[in-house]
Amino acid sequence: MAKKDLTILPTNQLLQQVWDYLLSRPNKKGEYKKLEHEGLYLLGWKVGLRISEAINFDLSLEHQQAEYKNLYLLRGKRDKERWVYVSPEVVKELKKRNWQPNQTNRISFFDFLGKVKEEMNLPNNVELAPHTLRRCFATYQAISGMPLPVLQKVLGHSKVSTTALYIRDGDLGNLVRFRPV
């Protein structure tokens, strides 16, 4: 059995470069979901949503109490509901794109990211797929110091052990920075 190549998560810097590329990239012939795909990219990268949650994300479900501003109700896996924080910057970008739920699908977004990876000449060992964005979010939040139980709630996991599986090192420098004693 052949060994599977080791893949690495994109750094936050690379994710920002992909975002900048998406903003400057013209629509290709036959593409008509660019704005929706940009919204999905943000919801995965900046909010950590599963692709199904991002596709169904509804801006009208913001919490009505002022003290909970920027919290949005999600209907996640197995119809579980949870509140997620979505920054005003992400909301602004979604509104600029006239974001509506259920305007595209996971396969279309997967194919879109594959094209972007190819156009940007990213190395084969760098992951760029819908779920990669969620794993990057989880990894970089943990590296930044978010406690695992809090991250568990943010990601909507019932067990902290599931959350721990998401944490991957996307930057070898962090292995040195956070080396075990």
Image: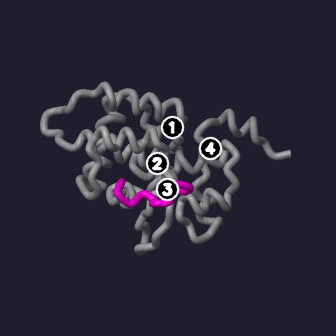
Q: Are marks 2 and 1 in contact (CB under 8 Å)?
A: yes
Q: Which residue is mark 4?
A: 169
Q: Are marks 4 and 1 in contact (CB under 8 Å)?
A: no
Instruction: Assign the magenta stretch its main secondary structure.
Output: helix
Q: Which residue is mark 2?
A: 132
Tag 2's secondary structure? helix
**Is 144 placed above or below 65 here?**
above
Q: How many marks are shown on the rendered structure?
A: 4
Which residue type does callout 2 highlight?
A: Thr
Say whether residue 138 is visible: yes
In the image, which is nearer the foreground, mark 1 or mark 3?
3
Q: Which residue is mark 1?
A: 10
Residue appearing at x 25%, y 50% in the figure: 108
Q: Which residues are magenta?
A: 59-68
- Disc 4 to disc 2, how far (Cα)? 12 Å
Answer with left or right where residue 53 lies relative to residue 115: right
Q: Position of residue 64 (x, y in %)?
A: 45, 60
* Quadrant (top left/top right/bottom left/bottom right) for the C terminus: top right
Picture quadrant of residue 24 = top left
Q: Which residue is farthest top? A: 24
Picture quadrant of residue 32 = top left
Q: Which residue is mark 3?
A: 71
Q: Earlier in the sequence, mark 3 or mark 4?
A: 3
Within-10-Å neighbours for mark 1: few <14, some 14–19, many 20+:
many
- Disc 2 to disc 3, how far (Cα)? 23 Å
Q: Earlier in the sequence, mark 4 or mark 2?
A: 2
- Disc 1 to disc 3, how far (Cα)? 27 Å
Q: Is residue 99 magenta?
A: no
